[in-house]
Amino acid sequence: MILSLAGLPHHIRVSRQKSHHGLRRVALLLILFTLEGCYYVQAIRGHTELMNRRRPVAEVIADDDSSDELRRKLALVQAARDFAVSELMLPDNDSYRSYADLERDFVVWNVFAAPEFDLEAKTWCFPVAGCVAYRGYFSESSAAAFSKKLAGQGYDVTIGGVSAYSTLGRFADPLLNTMMRWTDVDLVTTMFHELAHQKLYVKGDSMFNESFASVVADYGIARWLDLREQIAAAPSAGGDEHVRRSMMALVVATRVELNTLYDGTMTEDRMRQQKNSIFRKLSDDAEALVRADGGKVRNWLAAPMNNARLVSMNLYEGRFNAFQSILATCDDDLRCFYARAERLAELSFADRSKQLANLQHQLPISAPD
């Protein structure tokens, strides 16, 4: 996930500046605050607090006050961090070489929105990150207030707590306490995902960015587990993947059904009723999959569902099969995979989307049993 703070111009986000930049910085800040008000203020404050809490990982491991479990996880992640450089060709920088305890469960809360009868995500645009399909807040109450405002304008809205993020390499992103409650597999996978954003990022194409990073992370964790011979100790990397892909097949089918509904000629009241029925069926079918698997996986399609929740999922999965197809065509060679992804990144949005849509159907999405 990309933190929307990345949209701030770099010279505003860097704390130490040469004096001759002062007037320029003030002028730009005035423009930004006039346009966005408190949003940029909370972003700057939140990120500054986060960065000020960083400590080198080695220092945290050596600290007698650190728990044994924290020491173990940090040592594991540092080994995986080196693996990301040597085997996955991900950026070799200071990101995830430090640790910060934020003393809360999430680092930011992202707000997603979509029209009531449309699966096109509402976007917000920033100077560096481009247009993204979410807006991040360091305060849950601020995210809730913004969500309420959007709902009052007729949007379907959802809020998601985020445990990790990337500033696209512009800062030395730390490991966070919000990540430490995860399993080892989820922790390492997420770090690979965030580093992949630093490897390749297309301004204004959230689906490309998130799907690309998800495929890199999935490939990376499989290689990492194979190297460490931990697959038997990490069931979430095997059996649970089938459930996840089956649930995403339900999402794909639901998107098709909803798009047909929204393109129809029903009255709004009738369309609203039908929409609610479709979403209830999605949640019920997903619950059946979870129960059949023994309840080992959380039903992340549980009610209440709406368009905003659906489009937020599509960011990560919308082009997943397309990038998997590229990786398969490259015989799992990452140099080839990255080169092809970079060529796609150079295309216009329309041409890139067309090529990815064609690739999306070359590998079948797992259908529910």
Image (cartoon, rainbow, N blue to C red):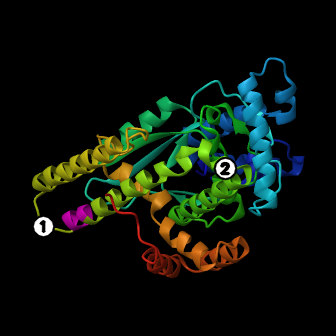
Label for residue 141? Answer: none
Amino acid of disc 2 = Ser
Q: In front here: 315 or 136?
A: 315
**Residue 290 colored in magenta in the image:** no
Q: In front here: 132 or 331?
A: 331
Residue at 36% from the left image edge and 37% from the top image edge: 148
What secondary structure is the magenta-colored segment mainly? helix
Give the x, y percent position of residue 61. 83, 29
Residue under numbered circle 2: 166
Residue at 76% from the left image edge and 36% from the top image edge: 74
Closest to the camera, between mark 1 and mark 2, is: 2
The disc, 1 or 2, on the residue closer to the chain's N-terminal end is 2
Q: Is residue 140 left or right of residue 258?
A: right
Does dot 2 land on a helix, a strand or a loop? Answer: loop
Does dot 1 land on a helix, a strand or a loop? Answer: loop
Reply above or below: 88 against 224: below
Magenta highlight range = 257-262
Residue under numbered circle 1: 265
Amino acid of disc 1 = Thr
Count numbered badges in the picture: 2
Give the x, y percent position of residue 93. 83, 53
Give the x, y percent position of residue 204. 55, 65
Reply above or below: 52 against 293: above
- Label 1, label 2: how far apart the Cα atoms are: 43 Å
Residue at 26% from the left image edge and 49% from the top image edge: 285
Give the x, y percent position of residue 131. 53, 60
Tell me if I can see residue 48 in this picture. no
Q: Residues within 10 Å of mark 2 (few under 14, many from 20)?
A: many
Tell me if I can see residue 231 in this picture. yes
